Image (cartoon, rainbow, N blue to C red):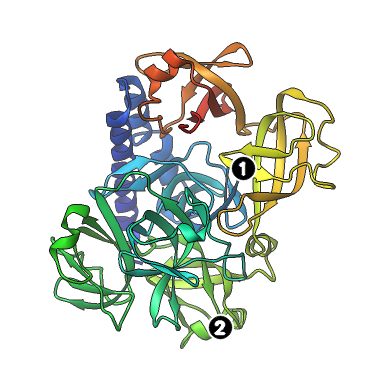
Amino acid sequence: MKKTGLLSAVSVIHDWRTACIQAVLEFTIRASRPVLVMLVVTLLSCGGGGGLVASLTAPGGVGSGGTGIVEGLIAGFGSVIVDGVEYDDSAAVSQTEDEEGKYSPTQTKLGQRVTLTQSLAGVANVINVVPLLRGPINASLQGNYFQVMHQWVQVLPQSTASGNATVLDGLANLNALQSSAMVQVYGIWVFDANKNAYVLQASRIELLSTPPTYYLVSGLVLGRSNNDLQINQPSIAPQIHPLNALPQSIALGTLVRAWVQAATLGNTSGNVFQATRVVDATPATSNGQTLLISVPAQASNVQNGQLQTQGLNLQIPPALAAQMPQSSSLVQLSVINTNGVLTVMKVNTPSNTPALQAQVGGQVQIKGAIPWIANPPTINMRGTLVVGTNAPGVINQTCPAQNVSNPVQVDIIANLGPPGSPLVAQSVTCTLTPPTQSVIQQSGYLLSYTKDLSTLTFSIAGSPVSMALMAGTVLPPPPNDLPNLVKNKTPLTIQYQVINSVNQIRDFQPPPPN
């Protein structure tokens, strides 16, 4: 869309290498011990003749058109499941961008909106986690709407054809969405005739326990005056006043993200935000590259063969326009960039795509290998609590009738209920021998670690188990940093995969504070 030809391919590779190196450096700075060997190994994977950059430039890779980019909603975990499709993320870096344009490792969670880059079909190498609002609630929930940073947010109290019910994190229920609460919101911008504005249809809302130094505001550009932007609301005209020159690509209809220093929020009148950084957040593809994106849309949104969504101007041939649903519904569009023109090649709707049908029905799938406890009333797997797992007819006969200490592969289908409620199991099936590279979850504690973090040794089921860190694994901060974990023998929930005969740790979580 914005980059074409060989130059765009080189730019994509350069941008990715920069992001990768920034992520590694950020990880190194934040780690509680020197990580020189880990840094060298991971930096080598950011460039040169092998690793992730090699996959970017190989035939069929992202830089040459290849399998391209996926933008959508995390609706489960096996590896990671986006819009009902599972992608292998065992070699992926999950990251998020900050106010300086640096990338740091982060965890993928249910309900997040992400942009996933594939090196091969079905294999992710980078997962960008993209929040769209961060800051104080300035208008409490009324009906299904509230405001963050003066932008309208809509919650979905139940799963509908337009999208999944909103996931809450740290909030007991929707009544907790009160003025002055600090939140971070993921979702998608849609035009709402009732508000005469673009509203953020929230897929996930997180309560922030610590006030951020920088707030985040985003939306669709409805007006530009010199270096100032009007976003989302034509009648109220909230403004973004960048403190630096705007990128030239930012024009009417562009999706932008802007960072605002919290300390300066009260320095201007009304809802004018002095932004230290503004970026064009429209999904970007290079010439020949594909984009698979899910958006709520309908036939009436297509005007003169074009669909405007998320800052994109998509060309839709008449035969495909006729496949758009008559009422607002989640659709998944397969798009190709041909010399900057974005053309829809395929329209997936819930009626013709089982994965989307399951998703708009609020269905979530979670897979992993865990020690099996017979007839469990709840299962907490991949950081997600599922209740009702022993309800009549839920547990399949493939699951053992007794406890099994060795990890058993468990596949859970659950329904996403009202915001704040846990997932409710619909089916639980088991395989006694987990598939290769299955994500294994066990309990234990940290025995020791080498200073370069090349090896961490955990006690699992009473035996020492050596593991290596996956690139981008997020280390717990104090008071649960590595020295304290060893000293206190803190109980941990550990997630790892066996890759090339090596136990590679993805995540380890101490229990929450009392």
Distance from Cα at disc 1 to Cα at disc 2: 38 Å
Q: Amino acid at mark 1?
A: Leu
Is residue 227 shown left or right of residue 71?
left
Find numbered disc 2 in the image and state the secondary structure of the residue it sits on: helix
How many other residues sit within 10 Å of disc 2, few (<14), some (14-19) or many (≥20)?
some
Question: Measured from the top left, where is residue 302 in percent x and y?
Answer: 50, 83
* Residue at image coords 81%, 35%: 399
Task: Relative to 332, say whether 182 is above or below.
Answer: above
Looking at the rendered image, the quarter that the N terminus falls into is bottom left
Q: Position of residue 12 (x, y in %)?
A: 33, 52
Is residue 362 visible in the rendered image? The answer is yes
Q: Is residue 364 above or below residue 196?
A: above
- Residue under label 2: 299
Residue 407: x percent and y percent? 69, 26
Proximity of marks 1 and 2: CB atoms separated by less than 8 Å:
no
Give left or right: position of 223 versus 330. Answer: left
User: Which picture quadrant has residue 319?
Assistant: bottom right
Q: Nearer the viewer, mark 1 or mark 2?
A: 1
397 sits to left or right of 482: right
Residue at point 30%, 20% (across, down): 34
Amino acid type at circle 2 is Ala
Which residue ends up furthest to the bottom in the rendered image? 304
Relative to 249, residue 392 above or below: above
Total tally of numbered discs in the picture: 2
Which residue does the numbered mark 1 point to in the structure image? 385
Find residue 15 and name its label.
none
Q: Nearer the viewer, residue 166 or 173?
A: 173
| Sequence-first disc among 1 and 2 | 2
